[in-house]
Image (cartoon, coloured by chain):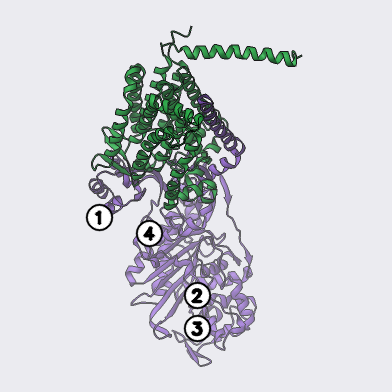
Chain colours: A green, B purple
Amino acid sequence: MIGVRTYDRWMLLATLTLVFLGVLMVYSSTSVITPTLAKKHVSEFHYLKKHLFTVLISFAAMWVAFVFDKETLKRLPVPVLVVSMLLLMLVFVPGLGVEAGGARRWLRLWPSTFQPSELVKLAMVMYLAWFLSSEGFKNAVAGSRARRMAGEKGVDPQFMYFLMPVSVMLVFQMIFLLQPDFGAAISLGALTVGILFISGVKIRYMFSLLVLGLPAVVMLLMKPYRLQRVVTFLDPWQHRHDSGFQLVQSFIAFGSGGLTGRGLGKSRQKLDFLPEVHTDFIYSMVGEELGLIVAIGILMLFSLIFVRGLMVSGRWKEGSFEYYMAYGLSLMIAMQALVNVAVVTGLLPTKGLPLPFISYGGSSMLVNMTAVGLLLNYSRSAQRNESYIAQKEDKFTDILERKKAKRAVYGRKK
Amino acid sequence: MENRRAAILSTAVMFGFLLVGIRLADLMLLDHDVLAAKARNQQQVMVDVAVNRGLILDRRGRALAMNVDAYSVYGRPFRVKNPGEVSAALSDATGRSYDKVLASMRSNRNFIWVKRKMETGSAERLKGLGLEGVGFIPESKRTYPKGRLASHLIGFVGVDNQPLEGVELRYNEDLRGEIKKVLVSKDAGGRTLSEGFDVQSRGNGLVLTIDEGLQYISEQALDRVIERWEAVSAIAIMMDPYNGEILAMASRPTYDLNDPGGYKTSSRRNRAITDPYEPGSTFKVVTAAAALEEAVVTPATEFDVSDGFIDVGSMRVYDSRRQDRILFTEVIKTSSNVGTIQVGSLIDNRTFHEYISKFGFGSRTGVDLPGEAPGIVRDYKRWSKTSHAAISIGYEVAVTPLQILRAYAAVANGGWLVTPHVVKEIVASDGTVLKQFNPGLGEHIISTHTANTLKDILISVTQEGGTAREAAVSGNLVAGKTGTTRLIDPDTGEYSHERYVSSFVGFVPADNPRFALVVVVFEPKKQYYGGRVAAPVFSDIASQALAYMNVPRDDFRNENVLLVRNDEF
């Protein structure tokens, strides 16, 4: 029954819908030549063309990821990690790196630029999946359990294994902070901690990371504009003319959209009121043009991708490479989407982050589509997952027995 | 163990999405009204609708002010890739200096006007060049087809149709029409998003009382007198004495309405109503009217002027011509200062002041033009010992040419003080008459008998032995009065011996006046007597005007006219 499995159609459908919506909204947000755009001497189709090109490339990447041999994939994490590290370093090479707004985050790449920090997320997920599924790590976890039973003292081997991925994460975060890209450092941290959390690492080790977080807080306080962002986030209306302008404009966009929106293409907020409307604040414009119904719909589509991703991971043996990959990739997409929508609705402090599949921006699109391709690849596993099926059957009989027992105790209801 | 943690994390993420969903509902449904209002507030702006100003026509419907289509050329500097080339083309087409255009094209402004209201032909040629970053907005441009004609009276508008002078200013609300506003979307920079609106406001037109032909005749005559006597300025006003309709109002120096910036401000002043002067002998009609009305004199009353001068306090006033005993009528006819002061002395200060005020001196005539001066008439309680005598011969008062004309119109029409006005009708753009101005005769200030007596005396002025033989018109009787006054020298503060004001005011035909006309010439050289300088101008204008108006000659006998008609049959 479950043996011949085809790919997850729901996940593909959700992704395609989001990408299609994204193309519409990118065109809607960039087809009006506002003075800001006019200064760049662009035509009304400039961004649409580039976006469509990105989408095309991303579909190709998705296809490659979809058909990629799963066994070969297992050997890739470390090379990918090294490559992404190198790319990230190249940003600092004059001529190759592109500086914008006081930050060096992009690589010059015909015909556009590439943001290695997006690739780093994917590389980190792959590395963690590889590391956490390794025998060494599993043994360490099992070993520490045994040691505790035996009441042995000394350094817990699990802690040493815990330190490994954490230090990789810290190296990347240091590079991010040099760019500087505070947001990317935080995102990567959250993703890493999330995956480590499900791997069964002791909670108190996780808490020890908070000590490492202290310098981050100090840095936050040292840079006044970052502190300002946090303060503004608490009461944007107080700062609506300066630091809170973006957020307030985002609220106004959502609010004027109402239930059904002003109609496709009829956003007024895109006329230079909303900053970065085609990238970071595209969700606000969706709310304004298409209303609450579509805005909620987008949330549901992201939730669908996340849930379907979790189901894919559930088909694989717990602790396996594929299990962590599927979970990690789903988490990567969902967290990025969640942070973006939470920021534009004022639930999190302002941070520039594109909305997956919808925002204009090649690097994010490419990485997220590749992630979906991998998820689809893992979903269509021809390989039987015996433990999964057995588990399911166990659960089923388990539930039946429990019900029987309940009935015996409480009697039949009604 | 692992399973539970994964479930916790997954649930947390899903809960996050739920939270955002709730927040969205809060923003988009609960706060919808407040935020939508804020959106409207910042996204929309009220803009005045473009106005097609009403036409200004003369009394026979000839256009004096109209609108033509024009293009305003603007630049968006940030879209201009090659400022040098674009600026050169713009400079050629608009005549503005290349450097200035280039400087504005290189500025970091979003929008600049290159040339407002350019004529259609050259704008089309410029359009054909397809310059990048250069745009065109169609606008309606106010033009004055007659240029300098009646410039002071019509006035003009600025580049944004803001009224600046004349009836353009006074009747702006009618010409502009209802101010319509439309709600226009704007972007964050305050730039509006529409170029032109479907709705257009059409102003109402004005039909003036002015007759273009009479205006032309008057202005030509003024040009000639300025040239002949090298005068500084000159004024002529023609008015229908029965209803106060101004038929012509001309001032020199003048200016071109299509290029008001190219002239001095002093040239743009409508001297006919803004510049009071001492009227001199023309004011004697007021003294005479008061004396007749108060019945202290009759036309046959005799006055002894044989001394040739009269002492008033420390001042000695001379006559220009030595005479013996003369009748009251001859006092005015020969413009005897000595006689007039004697006549005036028969009336007390208070009564005299009352008559001066009745004739409308010292207060505005109420003409529907901006900037009218009331003139100066001091209250009789503040008169000096010499004031009464000085005023009776037209000194120590300041009047505008329009005020003196109105006083003579009262004599012409049998004693009524009319309200001068320049607008006859306000018409809608479709031609329907919205309002007619017909103020009527006004207050009856002197009896018809007095008026007729004065009229007979004024007729004699232009007859043999009068001071203004040269004001006479062939074929019709002219009633009128000369005036010659010295201007006060600004250096010495005393009356100048070189700077005079020469004037003549009267009406024609005397028995059935078709118009009253005043001519005032300031500072003519070589000759200064009103009878020599202003009277011929009066005759010049009046004879042409009578012919233009087809007024029959009084010296043709009715039988002759009938004979001609019989011949025709």
Which residue position is annotated with label 1? B99
Q: Which mark is residue B260?
A: 4
Q: Quadrant of the C terminus of chain A?
A: top right
Do the CB atoms of the residues marked 3 and 4 lie less than 8 Å apart?
Answer: no
Q: Position of residue B146 (x, y in %)?
A: 38, 53
3 or 4: tag closer to the N-terminus:
4
Which residue position is annotated with label 3? B337
Q: Position of residue A59 (x, y in %)?
A: 35, 22
The kind of secondary structure element at disc 1 is helix
Judge the density around disc 3: few (<14), some (14-19), many (≥20) Cα neighbours within 10 Å.
many
The kind of secondary structure element at disc 3 is helix
4 or 2: tag closer to the N-terminus:
4
The kind of secondary structure element at disc 2 is helix
Compute the Cα span from label 2 to label 3.
11 Å
Q: Are marks 3 and 4 on the same chain?
A: yes
Q: Nearer the viewer, residue A198 or A358?
A: A198
Do the CB atoms of the residues marked 2 and 1 lie less than 8 Å apart?
Answer: no
Judge the density around disc 2: few (<14), some (14-19), many (≥20) Cα neighbours within 10 Å.
many
